Image (cartoon, rainbow, N blue to C red):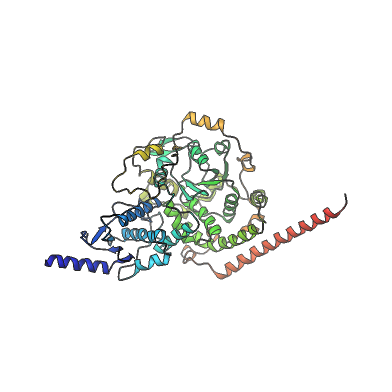
């Protein structure tokens, strides 16, 4: 009898120190010992079930598929008849990394299903005497220079819901988990219907040192099915771009060094291409993480007014490992200018002043100064040596950041590698383990997509013969390097490219905030540009009116 009473008292004490997520129903607790479920309380833990696959010192946040499975698990428990009268407690340990991921899952559930604001979801998690949560970090080794907090992740989830990036009612977790595997394409949708990030294709589908490599043709079926019309390559030329353009895709090269940050000219070219693309865009560098995530993040800041931290959090939730090292600080420094550009873009679009001619044609006609060929890479690589991710304990120094990240992700294979991936239908026929919950909204009524990564000679020949050739300015001159002029720099450069600073590294990245003078300067520059465009438009209208009034 005494043991029962003491057990009940201990249980009450645990709940008192726990975070109450749903009143008298769902709790989150950090415990030193493994508790036993009782007649009144049900305990569960996901530390060994949902595990983050790290690259280096990174440990989270858990990806979108894992977040989905957690939410399904909680919903199933809350709806369970056998648990209807019990208090449900998600408990974790004092392992700082596991605890941070567990809190992220609970907080995200509150935002997604309980409709709480990020601050409301965060508040109970930090109440009481429990230690603070370990902030997440980038996929590198060495000292962490940028902290991504739990609240940043919750705000990213909230923004994703607001802007329709995230909808678990239609989310296909099997498809997400299938295509994120290296052997199945290593691709993830960052902004559904707009941006897909993927690992760089190779000239030929093969297995190299145990790592599956896929040719451009392997992606064609998936890209066509999902209305991807534009490919942007950020790394050196490994495959011939004509393999995409001959198949009807637009293809652009915006090269900058692996592990580094883009110039302002490249950022503006990327934004203009994205803003004028007919369909969705597939972006890749070598691993599809650092350079790819950085530029997509700039687009998110401009068009959705998300903070740099929110963008980085969402990029890592959808594609773990995204945005690395100095790229994190670069995004913080670009936040103010991206917001200003976004405000101006929306204002001009509202007034009907944006057109395709003022977009892509204006930029591509002006680009005549900066070579984006592989020759520049050799010359600049020595100057940007600090941006390359290297370590004596991690192999040859000739390997770049992208090489290492690809190798690490490739080593995670759950099954033997083949040059052609398992079909998605076959993957979905596999027996579901008891720990995997069913989806909230089934999509079984819709036809399943066949994996594009079964590239054969027959498929390649068929794609070349059946696909219409798209005639575009860029595809017509795919072999010519893009260059910029002072015109590009004068109109678009804000002088805040992280690579151009002369300050010591320790002073460059001290805080996330940018200075007031810089913001004022940006507003002044963009206001001047806006007034110039407005004056030109009015002059053109007057000339047109005069010509119309003159009798022929």
Left or right of residue 100, residue 316 in this image: right
The residue closer to the viewer here, 498 or 196, is 196
**What is the x, y in percent for residue 160?**
47, 57
Tell me if I can see residue 325 in this picture. Answer: no
Considering every residue shown, the one lying at the far left of the view is 1
Q: What is the x, y in percent for residue 382?
A: 50, 51
Depicted 182 relative to depicted 333: above or below = above
Residue at 52% in and 29% down: 461
In the image, 51: left or right of 359?
Answer: left
Residue 215: x, y in percent?
Answer: 48, 37
The image shows a total of numbered marks equal to: 0
In-front residue for pair 292/302: 302
State the residue at coordinates (46%, 44%).
Answer: 199
Q: Residue 148, percent across and down?
A: 42, 61
Q: Which quarter of the figure is the N terminus placed in?
A: bottom left
Can residue 542 be seen from the camera position used here?
A: yes
As drawn, the residue found furthest toward the right would be 551
| Residue closest to the eye, 327 or 439 | 439
Residue occupying the point 70% across, 59% down: 533
Q: Residue at x 36, y 58 (%)?
A: 105
Please state if 46 lies on the left or on the right of 466 as rendered: left
């Amino acid at each position: 009898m005494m043991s029962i009473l003491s057990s009940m008292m201990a249980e009450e004490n645990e709940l008192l120190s726990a975070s109450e997520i749903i009143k008298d129903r769902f709790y989150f607790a950090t415990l030193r010992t493994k508790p036993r479920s009782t007649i009144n309380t049900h305990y569960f833990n996901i530390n060994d079930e949902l595990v983050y696959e790290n690259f280096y010192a990174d440990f989270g946040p858990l990806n979108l598929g894992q977040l989905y499975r957690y939410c399904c698990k909680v919903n199933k428990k809350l709806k369970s008849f056998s648990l209807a009268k019990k208090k449900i407690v998600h408990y974790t340990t004092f392992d700082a990394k596991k605890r941070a991921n567990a809190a992220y899952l609970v907080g995200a559930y509150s935002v997604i299903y309980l409709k709480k604001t990020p601050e409301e979801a965060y508040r109970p998690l930090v109440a009481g005497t429990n230690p603070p949560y370990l902030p997440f970090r980038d996929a590198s080794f060495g000292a962490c220079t940028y902290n991504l907090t739990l609240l940043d992740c919750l705000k990213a989830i909230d923004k994703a819901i607001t802007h329709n990036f995230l909808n678990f009612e239609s989310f296909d977790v099997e498809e997400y988990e299938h295509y994120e595997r290296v052997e199945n394409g290593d691709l993830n949708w960052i902004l559904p219907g707009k941006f897909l990030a993927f690992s760089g294709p190779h000239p030929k589908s093969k297995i190299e040192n145990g790592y599956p490599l896929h040719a451009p043709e392997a992606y064609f079926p998936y890209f066509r099915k999902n209305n991807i019309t534009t490919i942007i390559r950020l790394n050196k030329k490994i495959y011939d771009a004509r393999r995409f353009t001959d198949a009807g895709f637009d293809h652009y090269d915006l090269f900058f060094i692996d592990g580094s940050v883009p110039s302002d000219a490249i950022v503006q070219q990327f934004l203009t291409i994205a803003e004028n693309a007919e369909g969705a865009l597939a972006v890749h560098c070598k691993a599809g993480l650092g350079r790819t995530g950085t530029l997509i993040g700039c687009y998110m800041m401009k068009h959705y007014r998300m903070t740099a931290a929110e963008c980085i959090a969402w990029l890592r939730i959808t594609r773990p490992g995204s945005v690395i090292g100095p790229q994190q600080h670069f995004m913080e420094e670009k936040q103010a200018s991206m917001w200003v550009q976004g405000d101006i873009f929306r204002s001009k679009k509202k007034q009907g002043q944006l057109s395709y001619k003022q977009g892509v044609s204006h930029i591509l006609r002006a680009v005549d100064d900066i070579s984006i060929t592989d020759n520049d890479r050799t010359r600049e690589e020595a100057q940007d040596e600090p941006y390359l991710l290297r370590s004596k304990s991690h192999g040859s120094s000739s390997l770049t950041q992208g090489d290492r990240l690809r190798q690490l992700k490739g080593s995670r294979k759950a099954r033997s590698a083949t040059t052609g991936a398992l079909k998605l239908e076959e993957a979905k026929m596999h027996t579901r383990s008891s720990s995997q919950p069913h989806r909230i909204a089934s999509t079984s009524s819709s036809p399943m997509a066949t994996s594009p990564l079964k590239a054969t000679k027959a498929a390649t020949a068929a794609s070349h013969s059946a696909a219409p050739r798209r005639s575009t300015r860029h595809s017509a001159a795919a072999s010519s390097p893009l260059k910029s002029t002072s015109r590009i720099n004068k109109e678009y450069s804000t002088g805040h490219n992280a690579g151009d600073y002369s300050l010591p590294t320790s002073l460059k990245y001290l805080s996330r905030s940018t200075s007031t003078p810089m913001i004022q300067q940006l507003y002044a520059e963009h206001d001047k540009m806006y007034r110039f465009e407005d004056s030109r438009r009015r002059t053109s209208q007057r000339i047109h009116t005069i010509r119309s009034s003159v009798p022929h």
